[in-house]
Image (cartoon, rainbow, N blue to C red):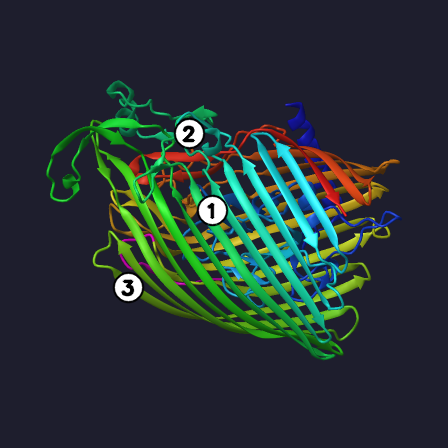
Amino acid sequence: MMLRRLSRNLLLSGAALSAICGTAGAAEPQAEKPVVQADAQLGTIVVTARRTRENIQETPVAVTALTGEMLDKLNIRDVVATAQFTPNLGISAQPASITAASVFIRGIGNASPSAVSEQGVGIYLDGVYIARSAGAIFDLVDLERIEVLRGPQGTLFGRNSVGGAIQLVSRKPTDDPGFEGKAGYGTFDDWFARARFDTGLIGNMPIKATVSYMHRQKNGYFDNSLAPSSKDPGALNSDAVTAAVQGDFGKLTVNYGFDYNVREGAPTFFQVINATDDVRTYYGSSQALGGSAFQIGPEGLRRGEQQPAMDLNGNPTFSVKARVYGHALTLNYQLMPALAIKSITAYRAYRQDGANGLSGNGQLLGFTLSPLLFVDGTVLPTGVQPVTPYDGYTTQRQRQFSQEVQLLGEAGAFKYVGGAFYFHEKSSEANYQQLTFVLPGGDAGVNLSPLQAFHGKARSYAVFGQLSYSPSSDLELTGGARYTKDRKWLTLAGDVQPNLDGQVSYNNFSWLISANYKLRQDLMTYARVSSGYRAGGINPSASEINIFAPEKAISYEAGVKAEWFDRRLRTNLSAFYVDYKNLQIPQFLAGTGGATSTIANAGRVAYRGVEAELTAVPVPGLTIDGSVGYTSPKYKSYLYRDPITDAVINVASEARMSQTAKLNTHVGAQYDHEFGIGTLSLRADYSYRSTVYWFTLDRVNPFNRDIRSRPDHNLRARVSLSDIAVGGGRLDLGFWGDNLTNDRNIDFGIDFGSLGYGSASFKKKRTFGVDAKLSY
């Protein structure tokens, strides 16, 4: 309790300081350790939010940059934890997967992990679009920085960046040879080892290369008595390799990048939180019939039973296996002083096979009837059989090719970016489900094995351009536009017999108008109006061709970016209003057909909110940073077809915004002091996130409140001694702790509808660890 009170006081202090300074906005990296000059000034941060390298304080975009140094020191190894440091960003790891994430910015995103489901927030690795949220979680082996761009980025980044974009920027090869190795160990036998080798310039050639490797391994944080520790829920075994080659040939620069990540792990434990009386009665009789006891309750379990799934060969398995890899070739050629041409050619692929364990129970037994009951009404008892709320085995495949050409330059008062983009993708998925449908009264159930499968392809073409004009050194006016054409094909298979084929095609024109003005050298204001577009398509989780139209948004934003007291204080502030039309609302359904959904363009939403960020160096050696993000979405309309009356009604007044926190905040402090043997660093970070609901309508999802994620508090700290001279190298030693408040909060939930129960996974408990890094 003392930790929590202290954390809240720190949070309020940080928020008050932001308010007093009256700035902060489009977002300097509050989570990063800023570059501090010898005279305690804040250093310059360079981002590529407008496709060219710019000082973040002169970029009229709401963008947060997290440096690789900060990510490394906090041992952040994938994108999920970055939401703790970024205003109005929410990232949740998906259940029954070790690579899928739900990403939302300012309340806009996508929760579906389907291999054809479009994101609402674009994710880019070195300029290459990662098309699916399935496969978006991979090991961040060697990053220079992460940039989070908030608001529609439709002009330069294109479709499916309607909520914003996340750019992952890799470290490039260095001119000098070098080695860097790091290893760490923590709670749950969580350990990792990482190494990076730089060749430097090779011989007399203008070519340099780097290769990095990381191994991660940990046991699960739920003790499954039916599995070894290495297969407990939350366990992971991962190997990742990245490589880069850069050649500088006068006017031509060539960069080749490769990344490969193979993972095997057990998804987090998904616990039954609440259920109908019929479901409680039915599964509650399991122990009397010789089966396992029914595990249910609102408090997170630390040990119990989780039965294995059956793979395609009929063998029991607890694991999910995934492979993500990609190649990228980037060419930059300076045609003339005022014009450069850039080409990005990329291929990426993803596959995942594994247990879809969402039952949260061991081997339950129950009295069953034949599935003929749902075919012709035949009541045929099949006796006491193994039963399950919901389990399965899922396979996913996806591969993509993209080609982008950009023209960049400046001449006099003009700066310009233009280009063309091509994207081609093929994907497939098969979900082999096992579930028991409990009949009214809870005396019997029906075991069902629905198969949901599809395969599809997509093509997208776009041309774009953006022009900035500076009539004076203080004023810049910018306009941009992008035309996109999308085509999609989808075949529903599995239990859909005969197979159903669908095809859709869409066109979109997105645009941007912005102006920024320097009131003085270190104080800039900006205003921008932009549009965004999330592609429509065909629902892969339905038993019929369910077509939905694109979402469209118009965003209005204004901000102030400022530095004060001779660059000892940096504050940024942004405010926004987004008019969102044709919101694609997936209605999760679960019944005799398994886990399915329907998608309709049923909503119109107004998003409004503010973002504030602050970084200060009040005295040499001490850095304080903080942020506040507030989003208040409101449905203007939500058209819903009542299944009883078949009437279409407007339920906007009762609709919740799923997977959106109204408030998230962060405050951190770091103190560095040089000793004779090295630099001692003390850092603490506290983050808060308000309540998150996973579904939109309580009338459809009666357990929505039970499985909600209540306000989340996270306190992490690190003590390190760095720059210790060891031979010709430098040694860094660190000790860290995470979730020091020991919150046991829900971090993802599913209401299984007519199957009669709601389940959720819980955040892991307090953890500690040590690490060491050696650099030459």
Residue 501 has which mark?
3
Q: Does the segment drawn in magenta span residue 756?
A: no
Query: Is any part of residue 691 visible from this angle?
Result: yes
Residue drawn at x 40%, y 57% as measured from the top left: 116
| Residue 84 location, quadrant | top right
**Percent x, y for residue 605?**
47, 54
Q: Which residue is mark 2?
A: 227
Along the line of sight, which residue is nearer the eye, 170 or 160?
170
**Percent x, y for residue 347?**
51, 63
Q: Is residue 488 above or below residue 392?
A: below
Along the line of sight, which residue is nearer the eye, 370 or 59?
370
Labels 1 and 3: the sequence-earlier one: 3
**Percent x, y for residue 469?**
71, 75
Residue with the most extreme bottom position? 336
Q: State left or right for residue 431 relative to residue 738.
A: left
Question: Dot 3 lies on which element?
Answer: strand
How many C-alpha atoms fall within 10 Å of the one at disc 2: few (<14), some, or many (≥20)? some
Residue drawn at x 30%, y 27% as measured from the top left: 364
What is the CA distance from the residue labelled 2 to the residue labelled 3?
Answer: 42 Å
Q: Which residues are magenta?
A: 541-552
Labels 2 and 1: the sequence-earlier one: 2
Q: Amino acid at mark 2?
A: Ala
Decide whether the magenta segment is chiefly helix, strand or loop.
Answer: loop
**Mark 1 touches mark 3? (CB < 8 Å):** no
Along the line of sight, which residue is nearer the eye, 490 or 257?
257
Q: Is residue 200 above or below residue 332?
A: above
What is the CA distance from the residue labelled 2 to the residue labelled 1?
Answer: 38 Å
Q: Which residue is mark 1?
A: 657
Query: Which quarter of the figure is the N terminus placed in?
Result: top right
Q: Nearer the viewer, mark 2 or mark 3?
A: 2
**Mark 2 touches mark 1? (CB < 8 Å):** no
**Percent x, y for residue 566?**
86, 52
